[in-house]
Image: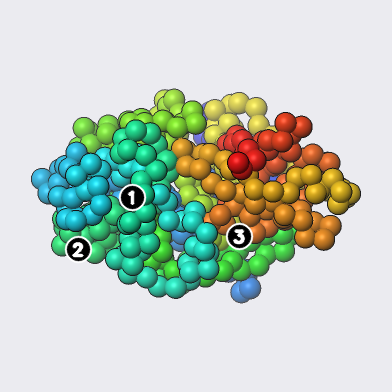
Amino acid sequence: MEAHHMFFLARRMDALVRAYAQLGRFSGAVLVARRGRRLLAKGYGHADHEHAVPNTPRTAFRISSQTKIFTAIAILLLQEQGRLRVTDPIGRHLPGYPHGDAITLHHLMTNTSGIPDYVTTEGFTRIMGTPRTREALIADFKDRPLLFEPGARMSYSNSGWALLGEVIERSSGLTYGEYVRRHIFAPLAMEHSGLTNDPAEGHAIGYMASDGRLTRTPYLHNSNQDAAGALHSTVEDLHRWNRGLPRLLRPESLAELVKPHTAADGIGYGYGCAIRGDRVESSGGGIGFVSVSAHYRRDDLFVTVLSNIENAAFSEIEAALAAIAHGRPYEMPSRRIFVTVDPVVLDRYTGRYTMRHMGRTSTMDVTRDGDRLMVEVHGLARTELRPMSETRFFARMKGEVEVDFLATGEVALNWAGHDVTARPAA
């Protein structure tokens, strides 16, 4: 009876993901497992569209900010080895770093350091294809004023994670990539995970989707992501990580990893992961790739979705797969219908807006290009806002985004499953 139920769930899950793929809203791989038993592990679309190389459960994808939880695990392992403590001021490991006596490793691991995020600055997309040393990367933000006193609040910052990469190297005597390989990936038999600057055989190529057409995304050199986002992995390897984590870390370390140390915008944050009730999530979005891994602790359900389309519906797919597994209602995807809007109406929406998510403030510029409305969030490529009505628009930027221009002048965004409000800049 149980085998029949699992087969039924797998068919519904596969039908859901295939529907997204057929609409051009997904390309990648997914894996769903409960208590270690796989319900679904399958690839969809192509790892290399030009050469028709299919995605499989063993295809390696850049996992972007999912890297952060592995960086956090590395710090906790070094703490277990007695080489550091998360309460250490960073000045103990990085002598001379500004505010090094006030900022701790814990602040970096919880995005509460106040150090501004180098990724969201204007101009990052222009230099992201150029190799940089970590020293040059850190120099980009080292002398910028803190956003707030360390520990005062949370503001998501890739900068802190680059500093953690340097701490790992100085504490271990190994490069960041080698430490993670030896102490995390090898013990868990994650043979297709690691850090490389350029795609290798078996690695997916990153794309952007528009009206069913895929175009390669601009080149991003991994030195610009470093310990904040440079790792690659597969759905099979991430499942091995989920199952093996209790063997890798001591119970007290594992508890610290997934404890909500801070919160912002209604989301608890541990060390490199977001916590909502019994759900622990690590997610990532970068140039050409988006991903999410979620562990529902109550029934030990693990769902991971890796995509090589930067604007894929990855979070919607994860939520629907979890709903199927839990016997809750879910929606099959449909094709969006777009309309034509008078350019005079579009002009009402142009301007600069600011919005906050995970405590981090980002700038969004809305401009008109002929009869099209365009949007650019700093750190992401400029893209079109396509009208579904005079007030509702759709964009694809690091996942799918639905945008409602409100009569108040504010903008309500549903961004990859998260509700965000943007307000006109002062």
418, above or below 160, in the image:
above
Query: Pointer 3 and pointer 2: residues touching (CB < 8 Å)?
Result: no
Question: What secondary structure is marked by label 3?
Answer: loop
Question: What secondary structure is marked by label 2?
Answer: loop
Discs 2/1, front: 1
* Residue 359 shows up from this direction: yes
- Tell me the amino acid under the disc marked 1: Gly
298, above or below 127, in the image:
above
Indicate which disc, 2 or 1, sits on the residue closer to the N terminus.
1
Q: Is residue 180 left or right of residue 195?
A: left
Query: Pointer 1 and pointer 3: residues touching (CB < 8 Å)?
Result: no
Q: Is residue 358 left or right of residue 421?
A: left
Q: Quadrant of the C terminus?
A: top right
Residue receiving disc 3: 381
- Tell me the amino acid under the disc marked 3: Ala
Q: Is residue 329 left or right of residue 117?
A: right
- Tell me the amino acid under the disc marked 2: Leu
Residue receiving disc 1: 160
* Residue at the image position 63 percent from the left and 73 percent from the top: 50
Residue 144, quarter of picture: bottom left
* Residue 76 shows up from this direction: no
Residue receiving disc 2: 174
Q: Nearer the viewer, residue 252 or 226?
A: 226
Query: Pointer 2 and pointer 1: residues touching (CB < 8 Å)?
Result: no
* Residue at the image position 18 percent from the left and 50 percent from the top: 91
* Residue at the image position 79 percent from the left and 39 percent from the top: 391
Residue 213 horizontal/vertical position (percent): 72, 64
